[in-house]
Amino acid sequence: QVQLVESGGGLVQAGGSLRLSCAASGTISRANTMGWHRQGPGKERELVAGFTSFGLTNYADSVKGRFTISRDNNKNTVYLQMNSLKPEDTAVYYCKMRWGTSAYWGQGTQVTVSS
């Protein structure tokens, strides 16, 4: 059983930055895919940024140019650098990773952007 622990959320003013971290108990270099999702108030959960099984990155249109996903295989940690934050980025952010057919979610971290 793999555990994912997110951290780094908080309250920030519009235009500010935050960096989220997702520490995995498994070896992320062996993960098929990994990424960050978010669920805003009254909204469905959506993919924000991720690594594909080929190691490529993809981003939601709404965050392109502002968010950057990265990874440190030595620390088994995935990061999400969020710049130029907007109130509409307010959501609970979840880390998700997949090894083979098994997918794992973190508990989520709240990001609140004030206007």
Image: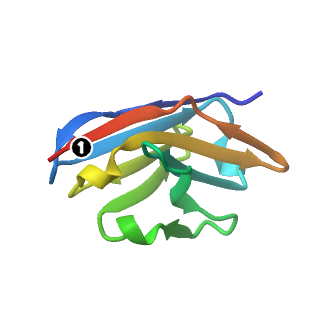
Circle 1 packing at 10 Å, graded few (<14), some (14-19), many (20+), is many
How many marks can you see?
Answer: 1
Task: Tell me the SS state at disc 1.
Answer: strand
The N terminus lies in quadrant: top right
| Colour treatment of the image | rainbow
The type of residue carrying mark 1 is: Val
Residue 8: x and y in percent read: 35, 33
**Image spot of residue 54 (x, y percent):** 67, 69
The residue lying at 49 percent from left, 45 percent from top is 39
Q: Observer-nearest residue: 114 or 12?
A: 114
Which residue ends up furthest to the front in the rendered image? 42
Looking at the picture, how far across and down is residue 106, in whole percent? 58, 33
Near-viewer residue (102 or 70)? 102
- Residue at (43%, 32%) from the top-left corner? 109
**Above/below status of 60 relative to 73:** below
Residue that extends furthest to the right in the rendered view of this protein: 101
Report the residue marked by disc 1.
Answer: 113
User: In the displayed structure, does residue 105 sit left or right of residue 95?
Assistant: right
Tell me if 115 is positioned left or right of 93 in this view: left
Find residue 64 and report its horizontal and vertical position in percent: 37, 70
Residue 50 appears in which quarter of the rendering? bottom right
Residue visible at 14% across and 47% down?
Answer: 115
Residue visible at 85% across and 49% down in the picture: 101
